[in-house]
Amino acid sequence: MAPLAGPADASMDIVDSQVHLFLELDEAQGLAAMDALGIRSALIAEFWGLDADGRSQPGTAADDGGWRLLSPGACAAAARHPQRFGYVMRCSHPDDPLLDELVSQARADPRCKAARIDIRKPHEVQAYADGGYRRFFETLRRHGLPVFVLTVGNTPLLQPYAETFADLSFIVDHCGMAADERQYDEILALAQLPNVSMKWCHAPRVFPPGQGAPVYPFDYLQAPLQRALDAFGANRLMWASDFTAIRTGHTWADALFYLRDMPALSPGDRQWILGRTARTVLNWEQ
Amino acid sequence: MDIVDAQVHLFLTMDEAQAIAAMDALGIQAMLIDEFWGYDANKDPQPGYRLPGGMFRPISPGGERASMRHPERFSYLQRIDPSDPDGDSLMRIARASPHCRALRLDIRAPAEIAALRDGGYRAFFEAAAAHRLPVFVLTIGHAALLRPYVSSIPELQVIVDHCGLSSEPAQYGEVLALARFPNVSLKWCHAPKVFDIHDYPFTRLMPILARALDAFGPQRVLWASDFTATKTGETWSELLFYLRESSSLSTSDKEWILGKTVRTLLNWPAPSRGAAPVQHVH
């Protein structure tokens, strides 16, 4: 591969904060597409798909029977191309007997930028609501590993954790995936806690398009984005495409260029959202 | 929109799988491959080989293979040296390939330019016309020399490469003047370099493109990125989006420039589209 020439505007350090590499694209294909898009770095959340038992791969059974997610391909890709890739330690088992060891190991790899937890199944959500994730977050806090939290319609449940673990950096996934407008208010209210950031990802499907269709350049997103900017500030908003999961028919390029070319976005805000926030929050040097 | 990139040097910086990944990321349905791997130790452009007489013959095995494996994503063009002793056979073979859409000439050396001026390309162009193979022609500021050929061989389809590749305003005027011949089209490629405008979204290119559209009409202007040869830092996506999202072009103009023109000129049908696969968020 030829090295990335870099976008014509050299100030645009573009970081995509979530791609499922190895689901559709391998490492070389990922780099080719990133070059075409002018994306300097991407944060890999490794995902090969679900196996016959509905378990997320790659993963393995922990001693207690829980499902431990692994990231071998991401770890290798980031080792080979540390300027182009970082990765998250994917988590689905907050009570993993080896949690401390795994987080310690992940934290020691300079290419592992954060953990990511997916809290979606009913028993997970129940445990989350009942304070059952305290040990998990406390372990991350102790090792200093930021954490992305994905929930669907339950993002406000983050508040007591974010208050308790004030020196752990939390990133709300996928704009919070609010159940409705009122819940989006509650999610934005999390911005009062300085250790909470938001990942601006899947906005075209998270927010209702109103009268129009969810088509590029997604003008209906300007209002919710402005509200997120007012609440969090650009330095706590980071863009991600999660392009393999786009269901509305738009491309990876569309997911980037609607923000890159949005007239209402100031150059400074754009620079933060498209790269600088990820660099800063995830301690990810260029 | 059916977007076709009318020139990429596949295999120079990326292979077939990487190209498909990037094309998917950009929303590009198809590309025309001008196969080029780089220069070998003898400074010959690969792939190809030397004939016993010393003449170099370019070949396109990777372009042909990629097109056979992914006919909806790739077609290719064939470079043929006008002095190749088997030129007519090569054209027959090219014409017989379901995925070879055109020929390409690079007329750059002083001897080549002199030959173009002196009628030395007549046999080549007549043969291309006879085989119904459109010819992309790259010259640097000498597009006007095509005039006697296109005026006297009406069945010949010529596509002027790279906006005529001259920053001299008078020479761009000569390129546009070729539009009076209905068998001449313009490849809108390398415009940022040709006109020395490098700040995306290249707004100052739009009046220059408007002149081309006035002269040729959108049905004879076709976009190509040639992104592997871009030395000034523009990305493939920028080279597409400045046109796709331009507020000064109509939707119909965009459809022609970004795909329909090359489909039509090269007799390259668009595939029928299936439904997008359903994916879940993780």
Image: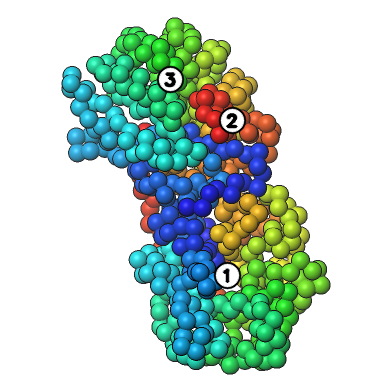
Residue that carries the numbered disc 3 in the rendered image:
A145
Q: Left or right of A37: which side holds B114?
A: right
Q: Is residue A161 above or below residue A38?
A: above
Which residue does the numbered mark 1 point to in the structure image?
Answer: B261
Sequence order check, earlier mark of 3 and 2: 3
Indicate the chain on which mark 2 is placed: A
Residue identifier under label 2: A276
Q: Is residue A244 above or below residue B204?
A: above
Residue under the image location 72 percent in, 83 percent down: B145
Question: What amino acid is found at the position of numbered circle 2 in the picture?
Answer: Arg
Q: Position of residue B24 (x, y in %)?
A: 45, 52
- The secondary structure type at the circle numbered 1 is helix
- Specify whether disc 3 shares its chain with disc 2: yes
Location of the C terminus of chain A (image quadrant): top right
Kind of residue sitting beneath label 3: Leu
Q: Are marks 1 and 3 on the same chain?
A: no
